[in-house]
Amino acid sequence: LPRNSTGCRNSATSSMRRLLLVAHVACGSAFMSKPRSAASVALRAAKARAKRKGFGGAAPPPAPTAGPRARWAEGPPDAALEARLDALEDSSIVDVLNPAVLDGLEDVREKLRAGEVVILRDAFRPDFAEACYRELASRHAPWSANEDYFEDGYGYRHLNVYDRALWSRRLNATFAVFDHAETKAWVSALAERDCGGACTGAPSKYRAGDHSLPHTDWVGQRTVAYVWHLSKAWRPEWGGALYWAQNDHDEATYPASFNQLCLFSVTTTSAHFVTTVSPRAERLRLTFNGWWQSSWWPRDEPRLDATLEDPVARSKLTHSQKQSIADMLADPWQNLGPERHARLLSLSEM
């Protein structure tokens, strides 16, 4: 955010407090931490200062804190499955989506552009979903525990495998679909967001007590988020649901469901969290999730003026783009001219 946006930060802090209250009601007290020592408080404050602004999360994934580092063990050989994986080579998301999903894109388009969450049930072809589920449900997957809590109220606890070098061939084939150039172009057109930058993604597993507290995902160059649920026979009372904070409470909770894809446009208002998984959960909450990201970095060019002059385009700036513009306008060596500088500065603070 612009460095002098004190009002925005105060507003964000108030909003975060309200969201944490909702999270406490929905998640129970599982995420409430114990009293901390002065040294612990100081350490966490230092971490929080080092984070980029926004509802939690630094741009790179957190370093694994525990867990084995062995490569992902392939599941039992399956000739038919391997043949289908071979057929996936150079496939985009359109090639593996359920045809019924492709028939209902108008509603998806409207919701994404309006800043709403999109829930697509039975999103992908069954064989594609089954192949990814087998990998995530494997007893030999090299999961690493990730847990941290920050001064602004954000925190998380779950398992991941961020290092793609540890992934199986099947899992890398899955990611390649999301990372495909045609996929990025398709999502860009659907959401009216630039998704031409680097795509990120990783498997996640939530156990009893795991959670992700309120945040927006508005970090770095993220523009559109995806969460692909692969939890079989999951029951809503086990928690692990996506809570979309913009909705009325009665319509804000989206339980995990096998082969369900959640999409939303990442902005300063895309606040959400994952409710705490119950100790009574009898299954694993599994997802493959990540973000499509923008490729544009602001420079002294006509597009900068056009973006700031358009309220809609301005509202869709990524965290890194906003920070880059703030840095540019604060740099006395930028040859912007006094009138243009004043106009761009005024627009950037709106």
Image (spheres, helix red, strand yellow):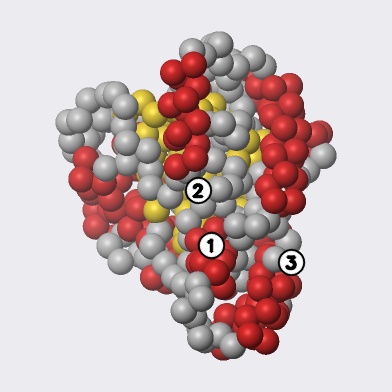
Which residue is painted at 38% across and 62% down in the image? Answer: 198
In the rendered image, the vertical position of residue 317 relative to residue 250, given as above or below:
below
Name the spot of residue 137 as percent of width and height, x first: 36, 29
Query: Which of the 4 quarters of the picture holds residue 277?
Result: top right
For label 3, the crowd category at 10 Å Cα-Cα, with few meaning under 14, some 14 to 19 and many 20 or more, is few
Identify the residue under disc 2.
52
Q: Are marks 1 and 2 in contact (CB under 8 Å)?
A: yes
Q: Which of 230/288 is in front?
A: 288
For label 1, the crowd category at 10 Å Cα-Cα, with few meaning under 14, some 14 to 19 and many 20 or more, is some
Kindly identify which numbered label has been placed on residue 350: 3
Query: Circle 3 sits in a helix, a strand or a loop, which is it?
Result: loop
In the visual, does 310 lie left or right of 211? Answer: right
* Quadrant location, the C terminus: bottom right
Name the spot of residue 98 as percent of width and height, x first: 52, 56
In the rendered image, the vertical position of residue 327 relative to residue 309, given as above or below:
above
Query: Which of the 4 quarters of the picture holds residue 179?
Result: bottom left
Does residue 219 show up?
Answer: yes
**Which of the marked residues, 2 or 3, is nearer the chain's N terminus?**
2
In the rendered image, the vertical position of residue 64 relative to residue 98, given as above or below:
above
Does residue 133 show up?
Answer: no
Which residue is painted at 70% across and 39% down in the image? Answer: 13
Which residue is painted at 65% across and 57% down in the image? Answer: 4
Query: Which of the 4 quarters of the picture holds residue 168?
Result: top left
Q: Are marks 2 and 3 in contact (CB under 8 Å)?
A: no
Q: Which of 50/124 is in front?
A: 50
**Which of the marked residues, 3 or 1, is nearer the chain's N terminus?**
1
Identify the residue under disc 1.
323
How far apart marks 1 and 2 lie (CA) works out to 10 Å
Name the spot of residue 323 as percent of width and height, x first: 53, 62
Q: Which of 27/229 is in front?
A: 27
Which residue is painted at 32% across and 41% down in the image? Answer: 162
Name the spot of residue 26 as percent of width and height, x first: 70, 24
